[in-house]
Amino acid sequence: MSVTWLDEPAKHDYPAAAAYLALVANPDEVESIVEALKEAPVTHQKAKDILRASRLELLNEDNAHVQADLEKIRRGEKLSPILLVRGSLALGFPLQIADGYHRVCASYHTDENTDIPVKIVELPAAAD
């Protein structure tokens, strides 16, 4: 069983990312990040590396959302790429999975070395 992916994130992934980011950033930063995500190129990262860099726990296969994504994988449905905001090693900020945490976990359960298409952007520069 292998994971297949859409070429680009689904349109509804960007508002979902904005909803999450609104919890950790101010409205101007959220707008800037989401616009940057829309323009960012798709690259690839390993499922295991995304989880490590985000410092998030691997959700169990019995999590309802992970189960739903695993079922999509079994049916051969394509998953949407993941939206990421780069962390800062120097400042101790982890990578943020703005949208796609459950898809990352489902992919990891399929194969931790799964190459996942991602869009990744930097944090906006802090105002002086």
Image (cartoon, rainbow, N blue to C red):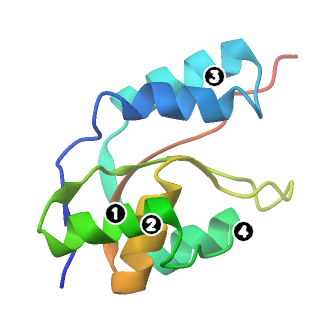
64 displayed left or right of 24: left
Q: As displayed, is residue 80 above or below residue 30?
A: below
Give the x, y percent position of residue 48: 51, 80
Compare marks 4 and 2 and give the one earlier in the sequence: 4
Q: Nearer the viewer, mark 2 or mark 3?
A: 2
- Residue density around tag 3, few if under 14, some if 14–19, many if 20 or more, within 10 Å: many
How much space separates mark 2 and mark 3, taking CA atoms?
26 Å
Circles 1 and 2: CB atoms closer than 8 Å: yes
Quarter of the image for residue 11 reads top left
Residue plotted at (69% across, 67% down): 56
Q: Nearer the viewer, mark 1 or mark 4?
A: 1
What is the three-letter code of the residue carrying label 4? Arg
How much space separates mark 4 and mark 3, taking CA atoms?
21 Å
Whether residue 78 is visible here, answered yes or no, is yes
What is the three-letter code of the residue carrying label 2? Val
Mark 4: secondary structure: loop
Give the x, y percent position of residue 55: 72, 68
Q: Circle 4 sits on which residue?
A: 55
Q: As displayed, is residue 90 above or below residue 26?
A: below
Residue plotted at (66% across, 63% down): 54
- Residue density around tag 1, few if under 14, some if 14–19, many if 20 or more, within 10 Å: many
30 displayed left or right of 106: right
- Residue density around tag 4, few if under 14, some if 14–19, many if 20 or more, within 10 Å: few
Q: Circle 2 sits on which residue?
A: 66
Q: Circle 1 sits on which residue?
A: 69
Q: Circle 3 sits on which residue?
A: 30
Residue plotted at (65% across, 68% down): 53
Circles 4 and 2: CB atoms closer than 8 Å: no
Compare marks 1 and 4 and give the one earlier in the sequence: 4
How much space separates mark 1 and mark 4, taking CA atoms?
21 Å
Residue plotted at (33% across, 79% down): 114
Q: Nearer the viewer, mark 3 or mark 1?
A: 1
